[in-house]
Amino acid sequence: MPGSSALLIAAVERSKAPFFVAGGVLVVWALASAALGTRRSSFPGTGAGLAAYLTATAALVLVTMGLAVATAGTDPAPPWNSANGDVRNHRVATGSEITASNVRRLGVAWTMPLTASSIYGTFAANPVTDSHGVVYLQDLQSNVFAVDLGSGRRLWSRTYDSQDIGPNGVVVSDGVVYGATAAFAFALDAQTGRELWRNTGLVPPARKKAGGELASGFGIDIQPQVANGRVYLSTGALLGGGIAYALDAETGRTIWSFDTVTDPVADKVIAGGAWNPPAIGPDGTVYFGTGNMYQPATVALKTPGRRLYADSTVALDGETGKLRWFYQAVPNDFHDWDLQLSPIYTERDGRDILLEAGKMGYVYALDPATGKLIWKTKVGVHNGHDDDGELAMRHALRVPSTDTIEPGIVGGVETNMAVADGVVYVPVANLASQWSAKAGLGKADFGAGTGEMLALDLATGRILWDAKLSQMADGDATVVNDLVFTTTFDGYLVALERKSGRITWRQKLPAFTNAPIAVQDDTLITAASFPGGKDQTTEVIAFRLGAHGPLVPSAPSEGAAGGVAANGADVFSQNCSSCHTLAAADAKGTVGPNLDDLKPTAAVVQRQVTDGGGGMPAFGGRLTTAQIDAVAKYVAGVAGPK
């Protein structure tokens, strides 16, 4: 019996739900048998009655022991409690039940409507989970939601109504949810959503002069990283350069800051900062990838310079913020080629490796102790401009007044990579920009993009396979057992076999998407996040093995509250006021058009609310016809100077 006891103890400590269910039934059976035996001396009887009782008891014991054998040594799936699953940013869903053999059984468990509005849609954060079965989400108006993982029931919400272009998001650690709006960082109680602290001193007043979310460039657009009692985050590009920070996790106090740009050219343009959470090394070193210098070609050609530390990986002392080393991928950049992704700290054959990539369309492997380049690999489509910055530094570049540049401003490796078992998985966006030497940067037609998912050998950077995708891979790479997942901009959730890159499952979402995914046990959470017009529905979606829910919930009935007697002012206040300015409603939103200036007709409002477009989600199917009519008449009747 010692072996059986040890097996049961191991199962109790490490197994999953089936064992506990069977064991619980066995305990109840034993207690019920004891209770009946004390009251009825004839229980369990003789003959057939005794045989049936013994058979049932033996069956329960065998099932329990069988499940103990099957599940002993299997760890419960850890929560996906940070943006990339862990502080080293591997993006691997450990302990999940989803595999290539059952992925087609994924169905909709629940959905949650998304009504935020931003230039890049409604949602761009990585969902996170905790060990208590709660999902934490942040939309692109910085509002935070706690949702029950099993049912999708909303537990609490915290409203900030502060536009963010993303990627933003929250993390959860030791019962606290950490995040930021464009203007400040915050901490919330994970059980109630109560704000515990707020740090409003992260965007210096002198840098609030360049336009954007705060009239300060891009404000804070990052999902934090929490480790060693500190919250690590950064502003995006600011006038004078973005700033990386370490905050005290308990109080929010600023411990240190690091200027990501030192070049004085940044005093006249927004530059630097970081967009994705850093990696934390085993010795506490913090590794950030930084953004570009938003300089036009005229500046890069006439007064070239490296523009440190833009487009770089910087290694910072976790306690002091002191720079240990940097590696700059693109000196003198004028193509918006950020090295913006989360670095990945990993190892291969006993050698530590730091991986990084960005919009210039290269993957880099660095020595995390020194920053020395180990290898680099070109990925995606390039059309001959990779060395423009360096050529300009040598005054050896001549540029036309207009040109086509690829990778473009939203191309290259746009979203985070994953690494597992010596292989790097790289999501790629292929999209050129129409570029002007005078204006710089350029414009891109999102609908013209294509995508790829590549697998690289971690030790050498050699391409193992390259899977072509119908649209840009904008949803990060996420490893789940023998699969790698991503989402594509045209609104598909895609699963590829890790061994070959073959697409084994593809699910159409009810809107376009630029949202990543999180996986917990048998559940995958992502979002249809980017409204593309009529009949598109933006929502968070939880897929679960064996679930069969509707992808788009049924439209509310006309007889529901707010139906034929809908009050236009109430509908506007509940759904529109955070994005639009309308004096009559005391609404001062700045995300969407100022309705007092626009003075739209009822027909225009009705069409826009129903179909969405221009960054606004479609409310057709969310609001009843009566509600849409009511708000259209209300806005048309009150909009205008007062």
Image: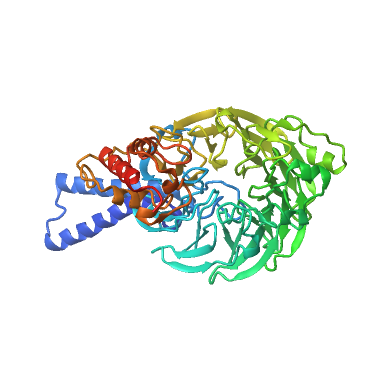
- Between 386 and 201, the one nearer to me in the picture: 201
Which image quarter is the C terminus in?
Answer: bottom left
Name the residue rendered at 21%, 48% in the picture.
53
Name the residue rendered at 34%, 45% in the picture.
635
Q: Residue furthest front?
A: 642
Q: Where residue 501 sits in the image (x, y, percent)?
A: 59, 30
- Report the side of 50 relative to 306 (left or right): left
Can you see residue 174? no
Which image quarter is the N terminus in?
Answer: bottom left
- Report the side of 596 relative to 126 (left or right): left
Name the residue rendered at 52%, 59% in the picture.
179
Can you see residue 359? yes
Q: Where residue 74 sits in the image (x, y, percent)?
A: 48, 50
Name the residue rendered at 31%, 48% in the picture.
571
Q: Where residue 624 sits in the image (x, y, percent)?
A: 27, 40
- Report the side of 406 relative to 96 (left or right): right
